[in-house]
Each structure stands twice: as C-alpha cells, then as structure tokens.
Amino acid sequence: MDWTVKAPAEANHNPRVVLNGRPGTEPLAIDAQVGLPLVLDAAGTTDPDGHALKYTWFFYPKRPPASLVSPSSCASGPPRPAVRPRRRAPPGFPSTPIGLREPPPRLVIENASGSRATVVAKAPASPT
C-alpha cells in the first residue's frame, strides 16, 4: 500500500533475493531425488530498506513439475505424531476405524523458517 500513498523513495521495497547463489526473481528449476537432501539457501538476500528478513519455505503447487506433489503431502518441522483413532464416536456420527493413520508426508521441509532449508522427497512424484 505504501506505493499508492508515498513517494517511491519512502515506500517499502522488495528484498533482493539470492537463491543458491543465483540473484533474481526468476524461478529456479532444481531436480530432486527421493531420499537425497536438497538445500535451498538464501544467503546473500538483502533488504534495500535495511529491514530484518523473515523466511518461510513452503510448497507452492502452481508450476507443472511441482503439481505432481500435493500440498497436503508436505510437512515442515519435526515429524508429527500419528493421528489417534477414536474408539467411540458421538451419537449420529460414524466412528473412525481403529488403526487409521495419517499418511506419511511425501515431501519434508526442514528448517522452514531459516535462511537455509533442506527439502527431502520421501516418495517419488506421482503423475497426474
């Protein structure tokens, strides 16, 4: 909104992004292999206004190669415990089958809030 009410010199500017040593905002295509860690490193990224930078690495399924893995099959941070099944449901609701577990993530992002994240594909992408 600053750009609509302030002079360009007074408005907040986008960071100057560097990803894995490559400056710019063009998408970076990286081939990943199941089980091998892939590092995403934003070292060198700066804010022209001198503001502190915050990082949030996440899966964005809009580009064709990435659309082969659904966002619900991604995890960031430590592993989540399995979903505990309910033994009895409230009246009027079907019960959850005993032993039902949440499927394991197909993609894991470690250090998702740091400037350097590690992505590990846990399963191959399935064609759509």
Image (cartoon, helix red, strand yellow):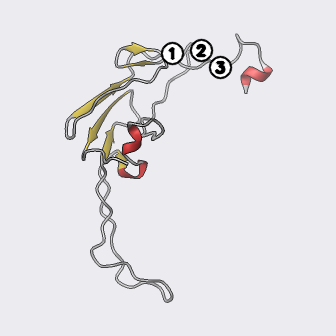
Above or below, 97 relative to 46:
below
Taking 123 as reference, is 60 left or right? right
Q: Position of residue 26 (x, y in %)?
A: 47, 20
- Front residue of this view, candidates 69 and 47: 69
Outermost residue, bottom direction?
91
Which element is circle 2 on? loop
Above or below, 67 relative to 31:
below
User: Which image quarter is the N terminus in?
Assistant: top right
Q: Which residue is mark 1?
A: 16
Q: Position of residue 87 (x, y in %)?
A: 34, 83
Query: Mark on residue 12?
Result: 3
Taking 106 as reference, is 71 left or right? right
Q: Position of residue 10 (x, y in %)?
A: 71, 14
- Front residue of this view, candidates 61 and 55: 61
Total marks in image: 3
Q: Quadrant of residue 114?
A: top left
Q: Please, what is the three-letter code of the amino acid marked with disc 3? A: Asn
